Image (cartoon, grey):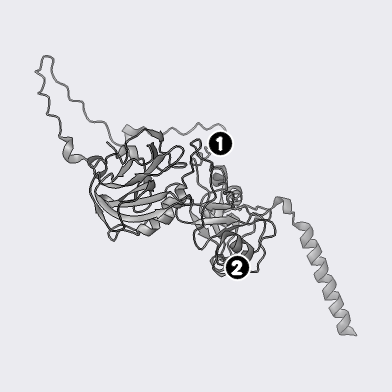
C-alpha cells in the first residue's frame, strides 16, 4: 500500500511539472525560421525570387534535365503513374514511396522517365506548337555526349533540385540555398504544415535579384558616423606625366589585326538553313530558336558541315534532324519532311537534308545548342 501511494505522489508531481512547463511555452513567440543567433535567414527572406512555375494541362513541369508531376485529388502513386503512362514501381522508387501510398493534392513527384508535354498555345496563328522542351531533351538525349566534352552543366534558367535527407526540414533547406521558406513552399506545393519527407525531391526557387545590403549598424548617441577610408590612402596615385607645349605628337600606332583574335563562335558563321523571313525570334524562356517562314517543299539545307546525329519527330509528327558540328555545337531542324539523309551521314555546308513540311503557316524551326543542351540565339551564328 505504501508503494502504491508513493507511485501516486510521483505521478502527481510529474503531471504538475508537465502542466507548468506547457504553461511556460508560448508557441506564438517560437522562432520558426531560426533567425536568432547564427542561423539568421532574414536576408534570405528578403531576397526576390521568380514566380512559382505553372504545370501544363497534364500537371507536368518540364525542364531540360528532369520533369515533375503534380498530384490530383485522390491520387495514389499508382494512379498518377497510370495517368502519365509510367511504371508505378519506378515512380514509387524514384520518390521513396510505395505504389499504394496516397498523395496530397498538389504534391510534386519526380518522374523516372520523360513523358510528352501537353500541347501549349501557339504564338503563330493557326500553326501547330513546337514543343521545345521535348525537342531539346528527348531528341538531344539520342545525340549523346561528345567524348571530349566536359561534364554537362544544368541548363540555364533550370531550377536546382534537392533530395531531402533524414532530419531536414523545409526551413533548413531554405537556409541552405539562401531562399525564403515561403518561396520554397510555393514552388513545391508544400502543405500548410510545411512537411517534407525523406527521399522527396524539391526544386529550389530561382533568385531574380540579390538580397539587399544589410542595414548599417547605428553608432552610439553623440558619436559621429565612421568615415570611410579614401581609395588613395592605401596607394597614392602616380605622378602625372605631362608634355611641354609645342611637342610634336607621336605617330598614331597601327590598328591591331582582330582577325586572329576571333573566337570559334564569331569565326564560323552558318548559312541560312532555308530562305525566308524570321517570323518568330529567339527567346531563352519561350522559344529557344527561330521560326523561318517558307513554302512547303522548300529545300532545307545544313547550316554547316557536320554529321547527322538524330532523325526523329516531335509529338505533332513534325520531322526533327539534328546535326553535330565542330566546337561541340549542334543544330536542330524541326518541321522537316522528306528527309534525304540518315543517321551517321556526313554532310557538307549547304547540303540538302529534306524539305519544309506542310503547315498553316509552313515554317522551319531552327536552333543552335551545345552538347550540354544550352541554347543560343541562332541569329548570332547566321550570315
**Mark 1 Cα shell of 10 Å, populated few (<14), some (14-19), many (≥20):** few
Residue 137 locus on image (x, y percent): 43, 54
Q: Residue at x 41, y 36 (%)?
A: 281
Q: Name the residue beneath numbered marker 2.
A: 97
Give yes or no for contact between labels 2 and 1 (Cβ–Cβ under 8 Å): no
Residue 132 horizontal side relative to residue 267, left or right: right
**Can residue 42 be seen here?**
yes
The disc label shown at residue 220, or none: 1
Q: Say how many tags the image has.
A: 2
Q: Could you tell which of marks 2 and 1 lies nearer the N-terminus?
A: 2
**Quadrant in the picture for the N terminus:** bottom right
- In the foreground, 334 or 28: 334
Residue 176 horizontal side relative to residue 309, left or right: right
**Quadrant in the picture for the C terminus:** top left
Residue 302 locus on image (x, y percent): 28, 46
- In the foreground, 262 or 319: 319
The disc label shown at residue 50, or none: none
Identify the element where label 2 is drawn: loop
Vertical side of 165 occupied by 318: above or below: above
Amino acid at each position: 500500500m505504501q508503494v502504491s501511494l508513493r507511485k501516486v505522489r510521483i505521478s502527481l508531481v510529474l503531471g504538475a511539472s508537465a502542466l507548468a512547463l506547457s504553461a511556460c511555452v508560448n508557441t506564438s513567440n517560437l522562432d520558426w525560421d531560426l533567425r536568432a543567433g547564427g542561423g539568421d535567414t532574414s536576408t534570405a527572406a528578403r531576397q526576390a525570387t521568380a514566380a512559382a512555375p505553372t504545370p501544363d494541362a497534364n500537371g507536368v513541369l518540364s525542364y531540360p534535365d528532369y520533369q515533375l508531376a503534380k498530384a490530383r485529388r485522390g491520387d495514389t502513386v499508382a494512379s498518377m503513374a497510370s495517368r502519365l503512362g509510367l511504371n508505378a514501381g519506378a515512380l514509387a522508387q524514384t520518390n521513396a514511396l510505395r505504389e499504394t501510398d496516397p498523395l496530397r493534392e498538389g504534391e510534386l513527384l519526380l518522374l523516372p522517365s520523360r513523358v510528352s508535354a501537353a500541347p501549349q498555345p501557339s504564338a503563330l496563328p493557326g500553326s501547330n506548337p513546337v514543343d521545345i522542351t521535348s525537342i531539346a531533351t528527348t531528341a538531344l538525349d539520342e545525340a549523346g555526349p561528345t567524348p571530349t566534352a566536359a561534364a554537362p552543366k544544368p541548363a540555364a534558367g533550370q531550377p536546382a533540385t534537392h533530395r531531402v535527407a533524414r532530419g531536414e526540414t523545409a526551413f533548413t533547406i531554405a537556409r541552405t540555398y539562401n531562399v525564403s521558406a515561403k518561396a520554397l513552399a510555393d514552388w513545391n506545393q508544400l502543405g500548410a504544415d510545411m512537411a517534407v519527407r525523406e527521399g522527396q525531391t524539391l526544386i529550389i526557387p530561382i533568385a531574380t535579384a540579390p538580397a539587399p545590403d544589410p542595414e548599417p549598424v547605428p553608432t552610439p548617441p553623440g558619436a559621429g558616423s565612421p568615415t570611410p577610408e579614401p581609395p588613395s590612402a592605401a596607394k597614392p596615385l602616380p605622378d602625372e606625366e605631362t608634355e611641354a607645349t609645342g611637342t610634336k605628337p607621336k605617330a598614331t600606332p597601327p590598328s591591331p589585326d582582330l582577325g586572329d583574335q576571333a573566337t570559334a563562335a564569331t569565326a564560323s558563321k552558318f548559312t541560312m538553313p532555308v530562305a525566308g523571313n524570321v517570323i518568330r525570334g529567339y527567346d531563352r524562356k519561350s522559344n529557344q530558336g527561330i521560326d523561318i517562314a517558307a513554302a512547303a517543299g522548300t529545300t532545307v539545307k545544313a547550316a554547316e558541315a557536320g554529321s547527322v546525329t538524330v532523325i526523329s519527330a516531335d509529338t505533332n509528327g513534325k520531322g526533327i534532324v539534328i546535326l553535330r558540328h565542330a566546337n561541340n555545337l549542334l543544330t536542330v531542324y524541326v518541321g522537316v519532311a522528306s528527309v534525304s539523309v540518315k543517321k551517321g551521314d556526313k554532310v557538307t555546308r549547304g547540303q540538302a537534308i529534306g524539305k519544309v513540311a506542310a503547315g498553316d503557316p509552313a515554317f522551319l524551326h531552327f536552333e543552335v545548342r551545345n552538347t550540354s543542351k544550352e541554347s543560343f540565339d541562332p541569329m548570332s551564328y547566321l550570315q
